[in-house]
Image (cartoon, rainbow, N blue to C red):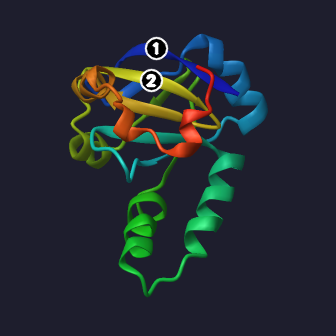
Amino acid sequence: MFQGETAITIDDKGRLAIPTSYRDVVARECGNQLVVTYNPFDAGCLYLYPMPAWERVRDQVNALPRTKSVSRNLQLKLVGAATFVEPDASGRISLPASHRNATGLEKKAVLLGMGDKFELWSEQSHLAQIRQTLSDDDLGDGLLELQL
């Protein structure tokens, strides 16, 4: 549903404008509702889920055993930190200050369409990720068959 990379500006009030190419999809497919939460795997990044995709993720994460610390950590970062946002008439959403501060999101950011969700990266964290390269040792057997 979502793909592509867009440079985004976050204003002084912590708002960002959803790119116009995605606004109709967000309104139609998501009921104009998104969920902002932490990316539990990468610092400097937030996930923005459409409501239907979020509900599936939330239910899967909440079904994990709370007796395992990794499960509790996922529940904390994904479900506990989840915030519902709706684009305003100008297509802007407000990001909670706590989320921006924890991930280092400032004025310049990058929005990535990742299929079923968006990833919102601080500009510096995104550059660091893009500059990393994969070596042969990083590729498991399953990845060796990819025809990129």
> Looking at the image, which is closer to me, 9 or 3?
3
> Looking at the image, which is closer to me, 132 or 120?
132
| Residue holding disc 1 | 6
Q: Secondary structure at mark 2?
A: strand
Residue 93 in the image: state x and y as whole percent.
48, 31
> Looking at the image, which is closer to me, 113 or 146?
146
N-terminal label among 2 and 1: 1
Q: What residue do we see at 64% from left, 25% from top? A: 2
- 63 over 122 or under it: above or below: below
Residue 92 in the image: state x and y as whole percent.
49, 24
Q: CA distance from mark 2 to mark 1?
A: 5 Å
Residue contact at pointers 2 and 1, CB within 8 angstroms: yes
All told, the count of numbered labels is 2
On the rendered image, what quadrant is the N terminus found in?
top right
Crowding near pointer 2: few (<14 within 10 Å), some, many (20+)? many
> Residue placed farthest to the right in the image?
28
Going by the image, does 12 lie left or right of 37?
left
Q: Secondary structure at mark 1?
A: strand
- 55 over 65 or under it: above or below: above
| Residue holding disc 2 | 111
Q: What residue do we see at 38% from left, 53% from top? A: 40
